Amino acid sequence: MSSPRKLVRQTLTIARRDFVATVMTPMFLLFLLAPLLFASFGAVGGIGAATVGRSTEDKERIYAIAAPADAARLMAADRMIRPAVKRDDGFPPLATVAPTGDPAAQARKLLSDPDTDVPAVLYGPLDKPQLIHANPTSTTASYMAALAEQAVRDQRAGLTGPLSTPTFTRVERSTTSLGGKSAAGFFAVVTLFIVTLMLAGQAVGTMAEERSNKVIEVLAAAVPLESVFLGKLVGMFGVAVLFLAFWATIGANIGTLLPPELAAGLGRISPAVGFPTFVALYVAYFTMAYMLLGSVFLTIGAQATTPREIQMLTLPITIFQMAMFGFALAAVSKPGSWIATAAELFPFSSPFAMVARAATGAELWPHLAAIAWQLLWVSVTIALGARLFRRGVLQSAGPKFRWKRLLGR
């Protein structure tokens, strides 16, 4: 058997061994369902936060100290303007009270009510309203000033109701909205980063376990260490593909279980290149990102002799990947800028930035160039990683980085 064929056979043997050893364990089921556990924790926290938010909203008011006629005009203006305000960014309910004695002192007393959150209070004549507020960045006082302006306009024009009767017709867009493309890019970058980091980091744990129980020495005696390195990389990539396929299948069918409003909202998230092309590009960029990060983590695992050393060595890599994640998110928010171009060219951020570009831009030729560019760096990283992996496994006194030996001098 020729040397390349033998290397391939040995690599596939190690890959099959690692794949089976990882998948055929009860812990893999827990690992497979880890995103569901994280999502459950997030949902519980979100429900708790929403409950607290609703409980505080019930005790929040904005007050207008005005005579009955002015109070009626303010309430009419509020009924007209409030529906145009986004519900999530809406204002507290408006309440009116009649002036008693000193309106300024009355307003300050309402603002300091210990049982109700009062962000702003209006008093005085509507053509020259006085507004007091507690939060310097709040827009509630500006909203109340707009109510007073509208009430004065209605009074001077003699208006008692709306002058128009609008008809709302919903029309489906023929193209993906800018917000939908940006949301698709953000979702793609986040999922790619989380899945890649979680799955590539698993290779370090496997490597540490095999070094502690001397399995790696047995493998090194049976096959070349280059085959061990490549086999582990391919085997863990197979685990990653299985993980991704499992959650992709769930994601493709989860729309039938969601409420119609939420399902409709998710349906508006669409990549610019179309879903079939986007899925193919996502898989390609996931492969590149995993091979880059996985080879780095495997190399780090080979240099360390104890779990403590592995933690110390992998922490900078994780921080670096977080920086690449932020770099790619900046590219999502500013497509076509120099930040996006830099993120697309830098090897370790390129997969994340390019998958975002697939969501926000319809051009395909940049992806062909980016995949070729990333393949070059994957080859360089794997070649250098295999050499460092061999050196780390064979050394007996822990990692000693001597650049002359590394360069073969």
Image (tube, helix red, strand yellow):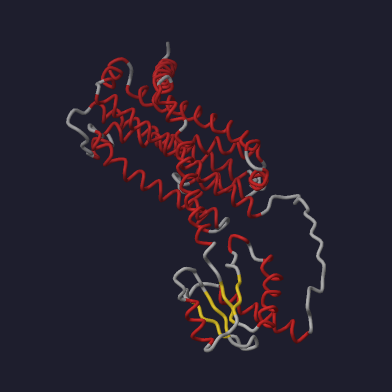
Q: Position of residue 229 (x, y in %)?
A: 36, 26
Q: Nearer the viewer, residue 94 or 138?
A: 94
Q: Position of residue 112 (x, y in %)?
A: 45, 76
Query: Residue pushed farthest left?
Result: 397
Q: Nearer the viewer, residue 250 or 233?
A: 250
Q: Position of residue 34 (x, y in %)?
A: 44, 34
Residue 353 seen in render = yes
Q: Residue at x 43, y 24 (%)?
A: 235
Which quarter of the rendering shows the N terminus? top left
Which quarter of the rendering shows the C terminus? top left
Could you tell whether 265 is left or right of 374 in the image?
Answer: right
Q: How many marks?
A: 0
Could you tell whether 315 is left or right of 250 in the image?
Answer: left
Query: Residue pushed farthest front?
Result: 100
Could you tell whether 211 is left or right of 201 in the image?
Answer: left
Q: With respect to residue 267, does 114 lie above or below?
A: below
Q: Nearer the viewer, residue 269 or 341?
A: 269
Residue 4 seen in render = no
Q: With respect to residue 215, does 256 lie above or below?
A: below
Q: Residue at x 59, y 47 (%)?
A: 184
Q: Position of residue 362 (x, y in %)?
A: 66, 47
Could you tell whether 54 is left or right of 151 in the image?
Answer: left
Q: Residue at x 23, y 33 (%)?
A: 306
